[in-house]
Image: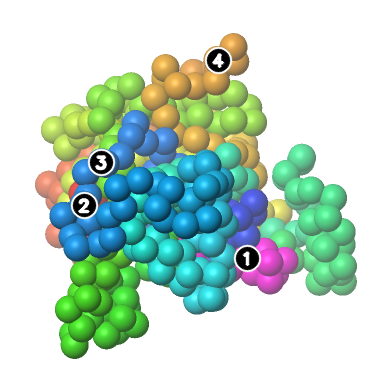
């Protein structure tokens, strides 16, 4: 029958809602949701710095010293203060104070804008990621993943040694990593609507200008302008890397990639997020409700379970570190999984949409409608 799986960020105490209660055979492995992992982990090459508030009627002091005692602080200290406020619990006074302070004047807005863009970037980079099955036991943990305080908390769960139970208790469920106001970054208008109500913008022209400033602040404008063949997924723990180019070549989908680490398309193309998922599953039970013959490892004992990752360009990997390129092995493993998931050697016809209706009728995979616009 298989078991249900959920993905957790152990370090940030966050859970990915898209993985809730899904079997590997039910389309989870090749679901569109895992493209989001690329956004969570990818290191931008920069961000767009020209923003609308420069044209708005916001206080624009000629000199920093005219802004009062607070502005005697160095910019770096102001940025740290704003960062702490932004990272406060959602809905708290400290959290909302970030936005109030950020639109005080254009000088602070510029600093706050950089803080927000950095918040959007690499939210899960170097965090411990694991996808846990129903039958994962606290008596059978991936080696070297959990800290001592976490192990102590896990030990207190006995006599019901469920790893999922521990993680569900510890993690914020249904929380998206790349979020400012509790919404996915791709759904910035929803966050804006919330702010419209908060600031009564329909009645107050000044509030409308405030909301426009806030909309600029809450919108990710990250740049990933290196060619796709320069991007790699790196396991920081094992010092292994996977080239995006190998995953693109496997699917013969050069036409839907350009700059950045993202694979575009409105069908079932998979990317580096799917590679991560395929190697971080952990359970004590091998039942996964799908064939895995030919895979170089046992999928329920993922070799990367609990590891830390980044997605970056090859030239920005740690200097002096020796990285092992395992792209060919991962390419072969992803092909094995695609054949089993789509139940045919002609799986490329499905990911390209050439036999999309047949996939829908069979229900062996989830229909993909994801199109990322950066």
From this viewpoint, is residue 164 visible? Answer: no
> Considering only order in the chain, which callout, 4 or 3, is on the residue closer to the N terminus?
3
Labelled pair 1, 2 in contact (Cβ < 8 Å): no
> Considering only order in the chain, which callout, 2 or 4, is on the residue closer to the N terminus?
2
Q: Which span of residues is magenta-colored?
A: 165-176
> Considering only order in the chain, which callout, 2 or 3, is on the residue closer to the N terminus?
3
Q: State the image quarter where residue 216 is shown.
A: bottom left
Q: Give above or below for 236 relative to 14.
A: above
Drawn side of residue 235 relative to residue 205, left or right: right
Q: Calculate the distance from the C-alpha at mark 1 to the C-alpha at mark 2.
A: 39 Å
Task: Give the x, y percent position of residue 114.
Answer: 39, 46
Labelled pair 3, 2 in contact (Cβ < 8 Å): no
Tag of residue 319: 4
Tag of residue 171: 1
Q: Calculate the distance from the C-alpha at mark 3 to the C-alpha at mark 4.
A: 27 Å
Q: Calculate the distance from the C-alpha at mark 3 to the C-alpha at mark 2.
A: 14 Å
SS of the residue under disc 1: loop
Q: Give above or below for 113 relative to 334.
A: below
Residue at 26% of width from left, 41% of height from top? Answer: 49
Label count reads: 4
Mark 3 or 4: the one toward you: 3
Tag of residue 48: 3
Labelled pair 4, 1 in contact (Cβ < 8 Å): no
Task: Determine which residue is flagged by label 2.
Answer: 54
Q: Calculate the distance from the C-alpha at mark 4 to the C-alpha at mark 2.
A: 38 Å
């Amino acid at each position: 029958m298989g078991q249900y799986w959920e993905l957790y960020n152990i370090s940030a105490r966050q859970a990915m809602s898209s993985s809730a209660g899904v079997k590997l055979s039910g389309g989870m492995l090749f679901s569109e949701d895992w493209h989001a992992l690329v956004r969570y982990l990818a290191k931008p090459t920069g961000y767009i710095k020209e923003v609308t508030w420069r044209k708005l009627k916001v206080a624009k002091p000629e000199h920093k010293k005219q802004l009062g005692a607070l502005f005697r602080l160095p910019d770096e200290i102001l940025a740290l203060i704003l960062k702490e406020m932004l990272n406060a619990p959602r809905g708290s006074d400290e959290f909302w104070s970030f936005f109030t302070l950020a639109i005080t004047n254009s000088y602070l807005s510029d600093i706050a804008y950089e803080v927000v863009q950095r918040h959007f970037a690499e939210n899960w980079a170097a965090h411990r990621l694991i996808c846990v099955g129903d039958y994962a036991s606290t008596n059978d943990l991936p080696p070297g993943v959990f800290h001592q305080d976490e192990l102590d908390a896990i030990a207190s769960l006995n006599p019901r040694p469920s790893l999922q139970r521990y993680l569900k208790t510890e993690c914020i469920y249904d929380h998206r990593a790349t979020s400012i106001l509790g919404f996915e970054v791709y759904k910035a208008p929803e966050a804006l609507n919330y702010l419209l109500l908060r600031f009564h913008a329909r009645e107050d022209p000044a509030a409308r200008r405030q909301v426009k400033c806030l909309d600029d602040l809450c919108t990710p404008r990250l740049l990933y302008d290196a060619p796709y063949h320069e991007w790699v997924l790196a396991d920081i723990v094992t010092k292994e890397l996977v080239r995006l180019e190998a995953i693109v070549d496997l699917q013969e989908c050069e036409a839907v990639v350009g700059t950045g680490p993202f694979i575009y398309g409105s069908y079932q193309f998979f990317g580096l997020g799917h590679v991560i998922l395929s190697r971080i599953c952990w359970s004590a039970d091998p039942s996964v409700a799908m064939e895995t013959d030919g895979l170089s490892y046992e999928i329920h004992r993922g070799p990367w379970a609990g590891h830390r990752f980044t997605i970056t360009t090859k030239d920005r990997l740690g200097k002096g570190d020796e990285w092992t390129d395992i792209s060919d092995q991962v390419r072969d493993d992803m092909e094995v999984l695609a054949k089993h998931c789509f139940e045919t050697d002609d799986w490329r016809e499905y990911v390209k949409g050439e036999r999309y209706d047949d996939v829908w009728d069979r229900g062996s995979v989830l229909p993909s409608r994801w199109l990322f616009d950066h």
